[in-house]
Image (spheres, rainbow, N blue to C red):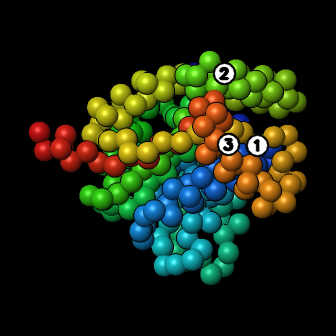
Amino acid sequence: MNESKTKEFFELPYYLENGKSIIEARSLQVQKILNNYTYSSILDLGSGDGGVSIPLIQGGNIKLTLVDFSKNMVESAKKQTPNHLRACISYLNMPIEDFESSEKFDVIICIGVFAHVLSIDETISVIKKHMNKDAIAIVEFTQNPNPIGKYFSKLHWFKNLISQNASLGFEVRNKISLAELKRTAKKNGLELIDERRHLYPLPGMRHWPRKLFDKYINFTSTSSIFNKIGVEHLMVYRVNHRSANK
């Protein structure tokens, strides 16, 4: 695994230019999840340009901490932050594994990250360590164990392979299964309380009207068929206090 190549990929504008609709879909799903919770602090690990988490703090006095190992991603997050929110956000340019804080958070987001970190076990340990007693963690995993879901995953992989940017050095560093990821989370004292999937946005969908785009994502996440085969798998965890007290 080549860490420098992975970092180089995320320093270039390709990810943000071509992944805008994917980021918006993830942000929409996270917002739907958080509609059921009250929170005043968010930690976004592997935050990219903040496209998932910055929209979450628009309506209140919520503190947001962004952590990303790409300097350009952190700078992009600063540029897209509205002036009235700047005092609410901390921007940290570092690997997730190096993040250390005495502060605990109400919500921790870790999306689009597990394929690229050095250690999934260590990343989950960082998540658990910084969760409040009643906190939730929202994590994302792309591989789908469903046979049709695997087809959609491979289709997305092939699209990236043949793109003009395929030579930039992007690589998946961790190829564990969904079941293995769940076992690792459980081993680290996290309890799964919700999960959902949605399909990737269709080509050209970033130009759709926002309401139509939202309807598509919502439909694929609530449909009994598409929910099973969706490529983007979001899971919601909380600290398993029964396990911690053993």
**Quarter of the rendering occupied by the N terminus:** top right
Q: Is residue 35 left or right of residue 224?
A: left
**Which residue lies at the image location 68% right of the left edge and 75% below the top edge?**
82
**Which residue lies at the image location 49% right of the left edge and 22% below the top edge?**
176
For mark 2, what is the residue?
148
Q: Position of residue 100 (x, y in %)?
A: 36, 52
Q: Position of residue 178 (x, y in %)?
A: 48, 27
Residue type for callout 2: Ile
Question: Helix, strand, or loop for circle 3?
Answer: helix
Residue type for callout 3: Thr
Q: Nearer the viewer, residue 122 or 111?
A: 111
Question: Helix, strand, or loop for circle 2?
Answer: helix
What is the count of numbered marks?
A: 3
Q: Dot 2: few (<14), some (14–19), or many (≥20) neighbours within 10 Å?
A: some
Q: Is residue 229 left or right of residue 207?
A: left
Q: Position of residue 160 (x, y in %)?
A: 78, 28
Q: Position of residue 53 (x, y in %)?
A: 58, 60
Camera sees residue 12: no
Earlier residue among tags 3 and 2? 2
**Which residue lies at the image location 42% right of the left edge and 50% below the top edge?**
137
For mark 1, what is the residue?
201
Q: Dot 3: few (<14), some (14–19), or many (≥20) neighbours within 10 Å?
A: many
Question: Helix, strand, or loop for circle 1?
Answer: loop
Camera sees residue 26: yes
Residue type for callout 1: Pro
* Above-or-below relation of 87 to 132: below
The answer for how far apart the CA atoms under marks 3 and 1 are is 10 Å
